[in-house]
Amino acid sequence: MYQYSYSEILEDSVTDGRAAERRALDHAADLLLAAAETAPGSRAEQEALAFTSQLWGIFIKSLTSPDNDLPAKLRADLISVGLGILAEIARIDTGDSRDLAALADICGIIRDGLA
């Protein structure tokens, strides 16, 4: 019977986690691009913004955790990106912006950077 080492299990867990993060960022980008084709304030826009806001809230919480193993500079940079996304979502919510495609692009860039 094959026995997995602890490091193999952890490596698989990180790989699975990154794949889930990529899928979530893909979904956010898809929702945002679809919402960009609708009227401001549409249900699609509301759903896209809510999902993206929740996603980045989770990312930021994870990035601020002392258990997060990413390098401090990378964590700080990703937190900054996340806060910028949340700020843009707030501007869209108030009608001061409508740049959903740019948010989708940023989600795509971050997704592509996940290894």
Image (cartoon, rainbow, N blue to C red):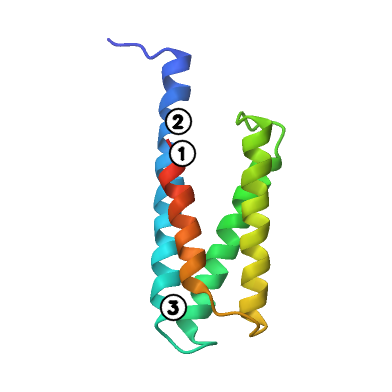
Q: Relative to 102, does residue 44 appear above or below in the rendering?
A: below
Few, some or many residues within 10 Å of mark 1 (<14, 14–19, 20+): few
Q: Position of residue 63 (x, y in %)?
A: 65, 41
Which image quarter: residue 4? Answer: top left
Is residue 89 left or right of 8 when viewed as pictured?
right
How many angstroms separate mark 2 from mark 1 (CA)? 6 Å
The residue labelled by disc 3 is: 35
Element class at badge 1: helix
The residue labelled by disc 1 is: 17
Badge 3 amino acid: Ala
Which image quarter: residue 95? Answer: bottom right
Is residue 54 left or right of 94 when viewed as pictured?
left
Element class at badge 3: helix
Element class at badge 2: helix
* Nearest to N terminus: mark 3 or mark 1: 1
Q: Relative to 96, does residue 80 appear above or below in the rendering?
A: above
Please name which of the two marks, 2 or 3, marks the residue nearer to the observer: 3
Badge 1 amino acid: Gly
The residue labelled by disc 2 is: 13
Residue found 45% across the figure and 80% down from its top:
44
Few, some or many residues within 10 Å of mark 2 (<14, 14–19, 20+): few
Q: Relative to 59, does residue 16 appear above or below in the rendering?
A: above
Q: Position of residue 35 (x, y in %)?
A: 44, 78
Q: Quadrant of the N terminus?
A: top left
Asked whether the residues under the numbered discs 2 and 1 touch, taking CB atoms below 8 Å apart as contact, a structural biologist would say yes
Badge 2 amino acid: Ser
